[in-house]
Image (cartoon, rainbow, N blue to C red):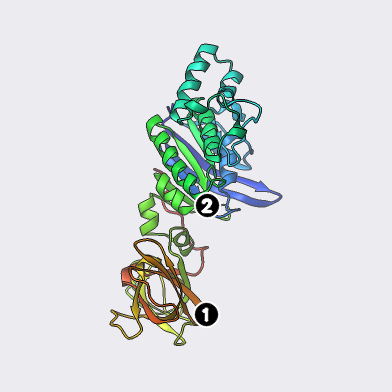
Amino acid sequence: MSDFESLELRGVGRRFGGVDALAGLDLTIKAGEFVALLGPSGCGKSTALNCLAGLLPLTHGEILIDGRRIDTLPPERRGFGMVFQSYALFPHLSVEKNVAFGLQMQGVARAEIDRRVRQAIALVKLEQHAKKLPGQLSGGQQQRVAIARAVVLEPSLVLMDEPLSNLDAKLRLDMRTEIRRLHQSLGLTTIYVTHDQEEALSLADRLVVMREGRVQQVGTPDELYESPASWYVADFMGYRNILPATVVSVSGGGSGAEAVVELPGTADGGVRLTGRAVGALGAGDQVRVAVRPDDFSVVPADGAATGAAIPGTVAVVEYHGREHAVSVQTGDVMLHARSATPPEVGGAVRLTAPVERVLVFPESLDAVVPLEVAA
C-alpha cells in the first residue's frame, strides 16, 4: 500500500514557550516498516507523531519522503492515515458511513467508495456491525472502525497514537494481534506511539526509545531487549530491578568489562555483585545496576549459591501460572524475581544472577549517545 521508499526526519524539533518538547529527531523509516515510539508521558513521542501528521508545525528540521520535503504541506495533502486514542468517531453515523467519510471528502466515486468501504470493514471483521452506530459497539469494535477508517484511504503511512490504551487487558491483546495482522497483510508503513514496552516489543520491527524530547536508543526489539544502551532504556525493556551502586573495581576497559559493584542499604550493609559494564567505568563511579526478574534465582538462605548473592526476606509471592513472581525485601530495597516454586512469605532467601545478566550502567544519562537510527 505504501507508495514511497523511505521517510526521513532530519533534525526535527518542536518548541513550546522556549522549552523543547522534541529536539533533534533524526530517523529514517523504510516502506513497510512498523516503528514504535516508546517512552513515558511527556517524552516527546506524541509531539513527534503530530509533527509528522502536520497537526503541529516544526520549530526546526525537515521531513522528507523520497527526498521530497513534506513538512510544508497541510495535513490533508500528506496522504497519511491517523488512529487516535479516543477513536474520534462520529456518533451519529453508522460504521460504514464513518469509514466512508474520508473518501467522500476526497470526492471519490460512489461505486468506488462502496467497494473500498466493504473491503475495509471486512479486513477488521465488522461485516455484521456495518449498520450500527458507534455507541452500539464495544471499545475494541470502535477501535477497529477507527483503523478501518484510516486504511480505507490507502495511505502511504499510518500513524497510531496510543490506540489501545482505553481498552481492557484482553481486548488490548486481541487488538495487538489484529493491528499486526493488518500491517502485514496490507503492507502498511506504520508509526505507533505507546508507553507500553510489551506492546512495542510485540508489534514493532524497530523501537525508538525517547526521553525528554530526545532519542535514547533505536533498534530492533531483540537489540533493545538484550543490549539496552542505558539504565533508562533497560527500565523500559523489562529490567524491573534498577539499583544504585558504587563501582569497586573494573577488570579491563570499555563495554563488556567485568565490574564489581557495591549495593548500599542492603541487608548486610553492603553487598557486592559482579556484572557487565555498559560503557566506560572506573572505581568509585556511581552507577545503576539492572537485572531482569527472570534472571534472578531465588535460593534458600542456607542453600548453595554460585557467586555473590543478595540476602533478603520474601515479602510477596504472586501466582502467575507456571511460575511465581517473588518480591524480596533487602534493607531499603525491594527486589523482584521469578521462581518455579513459591518460597514462604517471611522466609530468608538469597538472590543470585549470572554475571552476564547483570548490567552496570553509568548513573548519568547525559552521556548516552543514540545508536544508528537509519534502517
Please rate how many residues cluster around mark 2, counting C-alpha atoms within 10 Å: few if below 14, some from 14 to 19, many from 20: some
Q: Is residue 251 above or below residue 173?
A: below
Q: Amino acid at mark 1?
A: Asp
Secondary structure beneath dot 1 equals loop
Q: Amino acid at mark 2?
A: His
Q: Is residue 230 above or below residue 171?
A: below
The reply, left or right, for residue 256 in relation to residue 17 is: left
User: In which quadrant of the rendered image does the C terminus lie?
Assistant: top left
Which quadrant holds residue 52?
A: top right
The reply, left or right, for residue 101 in relation to residue 348 is: right
Which quadrant holds residue 185?
A: top left
Residue 181: tell me if it is visible.
Answer: yes
Residue 209: percent from left, percent from top: 48, 53
Using the numbered discs, state the Cα–Cα distance from disc 2 to disc 1 in whole angstroms: 28 Å
Q: Nearer the viewer, residue 134 or 187?
A: 134
User: In which quadrant of the rendered image does the N terminus lie?
Assistant: top left
Q: Nearer the viewer, residue 88 or 50?
A: 88
**What residue is shown with label 2?**
195
**What residue is shown with label 1?**
332
Numbered label attached to residue 69: none
